[in-house]
Image (spheres, helix red, strand yellow):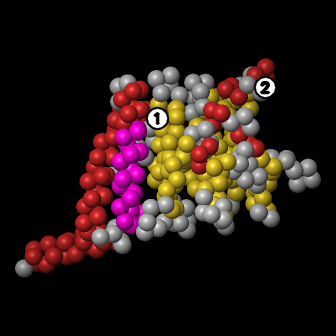
């Protein structure tokens, strides 16, 4: 008797969890999405582990086509796709959209980035992201659309009103990486806009605003840049050249153990040259994300 009660309890628990996870999706559509997810998972592995660039590239294109088909299923926004190991799926606090994001390693060792934004809706509202970063002449000053996206691999989203700060990593070259803070908003027609001149890299007295904030550093260095919930500030490593003669050559820049920040005042993020000055102060970071070790896995 007790065994039967336990089986019934477990069945109800699993059913309740499944219903909650896929709320609003018809049972037959859940089954369809699971089949798509299984196929997408295989393609994900091939994007990362394919022996040749041609195989990885074709798997990437096949993945995009299949993802679009899957997202056309009614209420697909409610389906988590949480078995896709090599794809970042990120939501802001208001859960009004999500971003699918991944990268593809070329035979040269550098990366191309891919992504899509899906708005929360019973019908499909999606914008593919086209990596245009190689062609941007002034990326810090450029405000652009999803068709000319500054490609990167996202690892954090911070919502501030109707703007969303996107923290990302770019395996820039074989010699240097970048960390970027981009800004996502939506125009009056609901289309995504990237970049906003809200980062003051100057001073309060002499401001200098940029549309996205970028730091470049030595490829093997580990650099932190993220929003800290306790301090309500953006905290990042202060970088210096490993040799004074390398001033301005950012592939030789590494953290020196001190930190800079941005602090929000009157809807602008103002630069703070130094934080954690006291020897008793400890930076509130977990272990930094080591992208270098994870490149082969194609994850953030």
Residue 223 seen in the current view: no
Left or right of 29? Residue 230 is: right
Mark 2 crowdedness (10 Å alpha carbons): few <14, some 14-19, many ≥20: few
Q: Position of residue 2 (x, y in %)?
A: 10, 78
Residue range of the region highlighted in magenta in the rendering? 60-80
Q: Quadrant of residue 20?
A: bottom left
Tally the marks.
Answer: 2
Q: Quadrant of residue 159?
A: bottom right
Calculate the distance from the C-alpha at mark 2 to the C-alpha at mark 1: 32 Å
Residue found at the very far top of the displayed protein: 245
Q: Quadrant of residue 73?
A: bottom left
Mark 1 crowdedness (10 Å alpha carbons): few <14, some 14-19, many ≥20: many
Disc number placed over residue 247 in the picture, else none: 2
Name the quadrant of the N terminus. bottom left
Question: Quick check: is 73 in the magenta stretch?
Answer: yes
* 239 relative to 158, above or below: above
Q: Position of residue 35 (x, y in %)?
A: 26, 54
The residue under label 1 is: 104
Tell me the SS state at disc 1: strand
Query: Which residue is at 28% across, 74% downward?
Result: 16
Q: Position of residue 224 (x, y in %)?
A: 62, 43
């Amino acid at each position: 008797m007790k065994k039967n009660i336990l089986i019934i309890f477990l069945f109800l628990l699993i059913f309740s969890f499944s219903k909650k996870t896929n709320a609003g999706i018809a049972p037959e559509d859940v089954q369809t999405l699971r089949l798509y997810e299984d196929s997408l998972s295989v393609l994900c592995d091939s994007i990362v582990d394919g022996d040749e660039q041609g195989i990885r590239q074709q798997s990437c294109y096949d993945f995009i086509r299949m993802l679009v088909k899957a997202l056309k299923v009614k209420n697909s926004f409610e389906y988590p796709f949480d078995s896709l190991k090599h794809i970042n799926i990120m939501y802001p606090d208001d859960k009004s959209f999500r971003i699918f994001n991944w990268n593809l390693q070329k035979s040269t060792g550098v990366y191309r980035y891919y992504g899509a934004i899906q708005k929360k809706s019973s019908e499909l509202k999606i914008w593919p992201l086209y990596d245009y970063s190689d062609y941007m002449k002034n990326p810090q000053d450029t405000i652009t659309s999803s068709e000319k996206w500054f490609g990167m691999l996202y690892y954090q989203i911070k919502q501030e009103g109707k703007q969303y700060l996107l923290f990302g990593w770019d395996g820039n070259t074989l010699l240097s990486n970048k960390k970027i803070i981009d800004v996502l908003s939506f125009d009056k027609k609901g289309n995504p806009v990237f970049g906003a001149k809200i980062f003051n890299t100057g001073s309060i007295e002499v401001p200098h605003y940029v549309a996205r904030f970028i730091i470049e550093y030595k490829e093997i260095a580990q650099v932190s840049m993220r929003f800290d919930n306790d301090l309500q500030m953006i905290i990042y490593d202060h970088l210096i050249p490993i040799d004074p003669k390398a001033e301005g050559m950012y592939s030789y820049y590494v953290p020196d153990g001190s930190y800079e920040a941005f602090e929000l005042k009157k809807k602008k993020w103002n630069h703070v040259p130094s934080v954690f000055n006291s020897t008793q102060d400890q930076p509130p970071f977990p272990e930094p994300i080591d992208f270098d070790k994870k490149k082969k896995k194609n994850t953030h």
